Amino acid sequence: MMHWAEQERRMAERAKRMFPPGTRIEMIHMDDPYSSIPKGMRGTVKFVDDVGTIFPDWDNGSGLGVVYGEDSFRKLTPEEVMEEQKQDEDMDFGMDMGM
């Protein structure tokens, strides 16, 4: 049987591979009544620590970490990331035009 520390290390390594810095994620559900991260909030992964906690820069300014395997969140698809970038470019263009 695998030692719990080895199992935790493997889970942390898996999280680091799946969520490298720059990955966009979206919150689905967090079992924390004091969380400042509502369902649907998106963020950009900064880093994953050695126990597998993922630390994103949330779009609402929070830096609250999410626990891989406990909190419910998902990686945005490449199409969703492209759509976000297009919206950002459209907003930037509108601001440049004095809108």
Image (cartoon, rainbow, N blue to C red):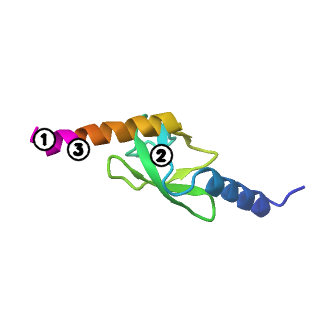
At label 3, the amino acid type is Asp
Give the overall secondary structure of the magenta segment. helix
Closest to the camera, between mark 1 and mark 2, is 1
Specify whether residue 93 is in view: yes
Q: Tell me how far mark 3 sits from mark 1, CA to CA.
A: 9 Å
Q: Amino acid at mark 1?
A: Met
Q: Is label 3 in a helix, a strand or a loop? A: helix
Which residue is label 2 attached to?
A: 24
First in sequence, mark 3 or 1: give its number: 3
Secondary structure under tag 2 reads strand
- Measure the C-alpha gap from mark 1 to mark 2: 28 Å
Residue 50 percent location from the top left of the image: 62, 65
Q: Which residues are magenta?
A: 92-99
Locate the C terminus and report the quarter of the image it occupies. Answer: top left
Residue designated by label 3: 92
Residue drawn at point x = 30 percent, y = 41 percent: 88
